[in-house]
C-alpha cells in the first residue's frame, strides 16, 4: 500500500491509503460506462448529412434573395462592364452581333460564336434588362431566360441547342426593341 499525496477525484480523500490498482479499475469502469452511451455511426452520419443540407439550403436561399440573375429571372440580370445604348442603333448593333453568333454556329465554329457573344453582345443583354423591365416585366423575363439559356448552352451544350438559344435571344431582343419604342432590328 502506498500513500497518495496527489489530488485525486472527489471520491478519494486526500492522504487516504489507496492502492494504485483501484484507480486503474475505476478508470476502466468509467470508460466502459461511457462506451455504453456511445451513439451509433448512422446517427452521426444522419446528423452530418442534415448539417450539409441545411448549409446548402441556406446558401441557395441567400443567393435567390440577393439581387441579380443567379439562375432566376424574377430579379434583374447582374450588370456587366460595358456601355449600353438603349437606342435604335444599340439594338441594331446587338442584332448584328447576335447574327454573327448564329452564322458562326451554323458553320460549326464554336470559338467564333463564343468570341462574338462574350463581349459587347453579352454586356448589352445584361445591361439593357432594367430598361426593358421598367416597361414590360414579362418581356424582360423572356430576355433574361434567353440569356441564361444561351450562357448555359455555350458552356456545354450541343451545337443545335446553342443555335436555338442564339436565335431565341435575338428574337426576344428584337421584340424588346419594339417594347421600348424603337423599330424592330433585322
Image (spheres, grey):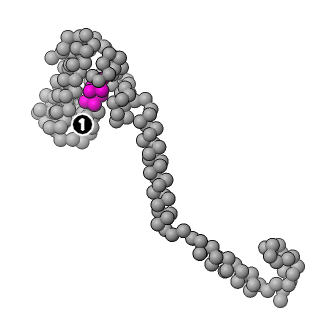
Most foreground residue, 19 or 115: 19
**Which residue: 81% across, 72% down?**
10
Most foreground residue, 158 or 77: 77
Question: Can residue 97 be seen in this snapshot?
Answer: no
**Which residue: 33% across, 20% down?**
133
Question: Can residue 6 be seen in this snapshot?
Answer: yes
Q: Residue pushed farthest right?
A: 15
Q: Quadrant of residue 66?
A: top left
Asked whether 47 falls inside the magenta stretch, the response is no
> Magenta residues, as a range?
140-146
Residue 131 at x, y percent in the picture: 34, 17
Task: Identify the residue position indicated by label 1 in the image.
Answer: 154
Instruction: Work out whether 88 lies above or below 82.
Output: above
Residue 134 at x, y percent in the picture: 35, 17
Q: Quadrant of residue 164?
A: top left
Most foreground residue, 13 or 136: 136
Q: Dominant secondary structure of the magenta stretch?
A: helix
- State the quadrant of the C terminus: top left
Instruction: Work out whether 171 lies above or below 85.
Output: below
**Which residue: 30% across, 13% down?**
86
Instruction: Work out whether 183 lies above or below 123.
Output: above
Q: Quadrant of residue 90?
A: top left
Residue 19 at x, y percent in the picture: 79, 86
Amino acid at each position: 500500500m502506498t500513500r497518495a499525496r496527489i489530488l485525486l477525484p472527489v471520491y478519494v480523500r486526500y492522504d487516504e491509503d489507496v492502492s494504485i490498482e483501484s484507480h486503474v479499475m475505476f478508470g476502466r469502469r468509467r470508460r466502459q460506462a461511457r462506451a455504453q452511451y456511445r451513439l451509433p455511426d448512422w446517427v452521426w452520419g444522419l446528423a452530418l448529412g442534415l448539417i450539409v443540407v441545411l448549409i446548402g439550403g441556406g446558401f441557395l436561399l441567400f443567393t435567390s434573395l440577393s439581387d441579380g440573375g443567379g439562375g432566376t429571372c424574377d430579379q434583374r440580370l447582374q450588370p456587366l462592364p460595358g456601355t449600353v445604348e438603349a437606342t435604335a442603333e444599340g439594338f441594331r448593333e446587338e442584332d448584328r452581333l447576335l447574327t454573327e453568333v448564329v452564322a458562326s454556329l451554323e458553320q460549326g465554329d464554336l470559338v467564333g460564336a463564343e468570341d462574338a457573344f462574350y463581349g459587347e453582345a453579352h454586356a448589352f443583354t445584361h445591361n439593357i434588362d432594367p430598361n426593358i423591365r421598367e416597361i414590360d416585366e414579362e418581356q424582360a423575363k423572356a430576355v433574361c431566360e434567353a440569356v441564361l439559356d444561351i450562357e448555359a448552352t455555350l458552356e456545354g451544350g450541343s451545337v443545335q441547342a446553342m443555335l436555338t438559344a442564339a436565335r431565341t435571344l435575338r428574337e426576344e431582343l428584337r421584340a424588346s426593341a419594339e417594347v421600348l419604342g424603337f423599330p424592330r432590328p433585322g
